[in-house]
Image: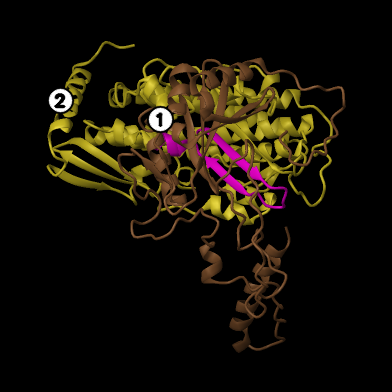
Chain colours: A brown, B yellow
Amino acid sequence: MIRVSDTTDAPEDEAPQPDELREGLVARLSEILGDALVATEILPGKDLWVRVRNDAWAAAAEAVRYTLGARYFCFLSAIDWMPSPYGRYLDAEVDTILNPPEPKEPEPMVPGVTGGDTRLQVFARVTNVREHWGITLKADVASDDDPRIGTWTKVYAGADWHEREAWEMFGITFDGHPDLRHIYLPSEFEGHPLRKDFPLLARVVKPWPGIVDVEPFPDTGEGDEQSAEAGSGEGGAATEESGS
Amino acid sequence: MTAVTDRQKLAYIAQQAADARVNVELETEGMTLNLGPQHPATHGTLRIIARLDGEQVISAEPVMGYMHRGYEKLAEVRTYAQVTTLINRIDWLGSFANEVPFILAAEQLMGVEAPPRAKWIRTMLFEMARVANIGLFLGEMGLQVGAVTPAFYAFRDREFVLNQIEAVTGGRFHPNFDRIGGVKDDLPKGWIDETKAVMAKMRDFCDLIEELLMGSEIFEARCRGIGVIPPDVALQYGLSGANLRASGVDWDLRRDANHGLLAYDDLDFEVWTHPDGDSFARFWVRLQEVRTATKLVDQLCDGLPSGPIMAKVPRIIKVPAGEAWVSTENPLGEMGYYVVSQGDLTPFRVKIRSASFNNVSIIPWLLRGVYVPDVITILGSLYFILGDIDR
């Protein structure tokens, strides 16, 4: 298991088994890519992560497809490592409209497996269906206003739509992609939703009120019925979502 | 394999001619036909803008996003249990199957393993989701080519499976039953025998479909040789599940990449492939897969181990930091979740790899030079679910 803080209960004598298959793959990749292969991580018996330099992204695709034989294209996407300025939870303890939270210092960015220096990272997974292994490749993308990386469409035709989605959701431009345009969102949509600084629109449209005082049911009266329903509806939704 | 008919020869020649023409002509010629987003043949809100030359498609472009719910964004602010509720709704016919890879990824990060009974119950519900999902496909594939009757049989017989799933989980379509560390509840009394009876009924349903549909000349003529996908193209586009196996690629995650996550290592099952790669092959492979799934459920019912259904996990689950990728052989294909955790109650990033997204990405390539009725056949045989494409 990949863990940043290791609190394992595993017995001490369970030395990690050498994973010959994956270590062999890493060796062959580093032969081809040289120092473009920045970091690797092996989960013995299960998985392999490899991080390559930005300019070697397309070369890495060719290496895994043609030399290593991973002809099955699983997916390609991106990660935004910036901690979300809007917080990580759905519920608020206080009413954020009446008591807006203090602006906090932005939390430090913690990169994941195989590290990384930039806010945005592209990652992709390919599988070798003959030898039954898969590999996750990652690459940094410069976090300036124009994040770019090479395209995989010349190597894996299926990367076409995945790169369109990554562009749409993160704003990463794939150099050499034939047709980079919106895939899910309307063509006039502005912004890149999966970036952490893009707020969850539902929360902007209707800010989460936090804990809501449930309106008590009126004793009688038909005129009160509608407002009672509205009040209890909102209160019901609040209490539903405040449990986890 | 039957002899090559004249129709197939014509289709082949027409396809070659259309390929040649596509390279030369501008796309502004011909008629633009808009299939969808509301259309009985498109399984939901898929829109295909097809440019036609007479009856033949010159280019087809799927437009998606009518059902995009932003699950990957939503998952960043929900706890793992809440995300499980969301992801039930990705592939709404094979409901339980959506939860499994996500929960397995979270368990991999936490370092817990579900107890054997939970594993077997999970696998059982997983295979029953396959029977329900692909059982419906068998019926509605007939619907795509014009045979209306099998769809009703499929819906009726699928109800038996859904009733069994409801008896365990409380939900026919959205069970929300998987938990990190195991499953939510144990099986009710008498459920095992009922399920075996239901699986026998589903096997009868498969025989019925074989007689009704596969034996029909019309069905064969509509499906054989239509939408041929060569295996290397299928691999490049990431086609998975029956689509890949119908092109001759022998790859099944249950057999080849289980890693001990589900109970398949203790079970005996066949993996079906077909060399043709056409719509008929995809139908045939799915028919055999439903039969195999019913036999798997029988095996699981017979060999179900006793014991706890939940491992020891804390009440409030904070998943340790790390990244995990788990994918399983879902009814629609390979579905996987790449879960990035930063040691919190909520995941940091969840990438949902859905089978139908890749399956549909081949449509622009596949539909060139195809006749309009065959477009419907091909879409039906690729079998995607909109919730799976759009997430």
Report the residue at 81% width, 43% height from top. B313
Determine whether, in the image, residue B100 is placed left or right of residue B119. Answer: left
Q: In the rendered view, tell whether residue A243 sits above or below residue B250.
A: below
Q: What residue sits right under mark 2 in the picture?
A: B17
> What's the magenta region?
B333-360
> Above or below — where is B238 with respect to A191?
above
Q: Secondary structure at mark 2?
A: helix
- Please state which of residues A85 and B150 is positioned toward the viewer in this rendering: A85
| Residue underneath mark 1 | B237
- Chain of residue at mark 2: B
Mark 2: few/some/many CA within 10 Å (<14, 14-19, 20+): few
The structure residue drawn at horizontal position 34% and vertical position 42%, both measured from the top left corner, is B41
The amino acid sitting under disc 1 is Tyr
User: Tag 1, which chain?
Assistant: B
Figure quadrant of the N terminus of chain B: top left
Question: Residue B178 in the image: x percent, y percent?
Answer: 69, 42
Estimate the x, y position of residue A185 in percent, counting from the top left: 40, 54
CA separation in Å, label 2 and label 1: 24 Å
Q: Is residue B391 magenta?
A: no
Could you say which disc has been placed on residue A164 in the image? none
- Nearer-N-terminus badge (2/1): 2
Give the amino acid at mark 2.
Ala
Q: Secondary structure at mark 1?
A: helix
Q: Quarter-wise, where is residue B182 in the image? A: top right
Which residue occupies the foreground of this view, B303 or B116? Answer: B116
Question: Is residue B349 rendered magenta in the image?
Answer: yes
The residue closer to the viewer here, B221 or B47, is: B47
Coordinates of residue B197 in the picture (x, y in percent) = 65, 29
